[in-house]
Image: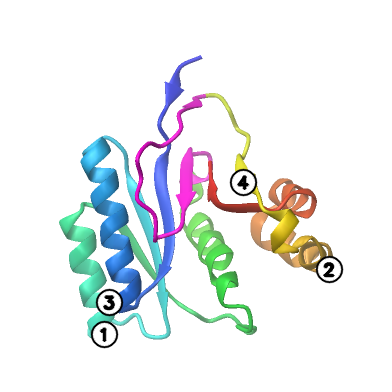
Amino acid sequence: MSKITPNVLVCSAMTHQSLWEIKILFHSVRKRYGNNIAIIWLANDNMTTQSAPAFQACTEVAQEYQVEFHAYEDTRERRNYLSSIRPWMLAKYFNEHPEKQQGHYFYCDSDVWVNKIPQVDEDDKRMYGTDVSSYARLGIYCHENYQAIRDIAGKRLADQLANKIPGVQWI
């Protein structure tokens, strides 16, 4: 089996703080890997029109670092848990791009410096993540909302989330 380096996948808000963080992430990935791996950036805001200053700034950064950029307006009915926007954006992206569902991705937060992305076997279809269930206490959330998670992420991922809660660094 050959080893591959997964593409980078990140979700963030379109704010000045997120833009600063995202530049650091992109710089670290490009410094280490050049353009040998893709970076996919999913961003959200209440306004994603091309005239919005935040959208323009994000587009410029994406072009500078040669990043695949997608902006999503937050149209969720329930927005009481801010971090729930990330799985929502991931679901939207993979529903819009089903050909990318079988890819290999290193999912991380925007506020990280990448020294090295772990390599995985090309045929490996498992999801790896840091188990944060001991302090995140999301197990109850996942069990209570299992059907909604299954509708968004599919049965396999919903089952994994119901048993172990992966942190923000996923492969």
The reply to whether the C-beta atoms of the residues labelled 1 and 3 are less than 8 Å apart is yes
Q: Nearer the viewer, mark 2 or mark 1?
A: 2
Say which residue appears at 53% left-offset and 45% top-offset: 101
**Vertically, is 70 above or below 133?**
below
What residue is shown with label 3?
55
Dominant secondary structure, magenta: loop
- Mark 3 vs mark 2: which is more N-terminal? 3
Report helix, strand or loop for mark 1: loop
Q: Is residue 165 toward the left or the right of residue 83 in the image?
A: right
What residue is shown with label 1?
52
How far apart in space, not on screen, are marks 2 and 1 (Cα)? 37 Å
How far apart in space, not on screen, are marks 3 and 4 (Cα)? 31 Å
Q: Residues within 10 Å of mark 1 (few under 14, many from 20)?
A: few
Residue that protrudes farthest toward the front in the picture: 135
The reply to whether the C-beta atoms of the residues labelled 2 and 1 are less than 8 Å apart is no
- Residue 113 in the image: state x and y as whole percent: 35, 50
Q: Amino acid at mark 2?
A: Glu
Q: Amino acid at mark 4?
A: Thr
What residue is shown with label 2?
144
- Mark 4 vs mark 1: which is more N-terminal? 1
Magenta stretch bounds: 100-122
Say which residue appears at 72% left-offset and 53% top-offset: 161
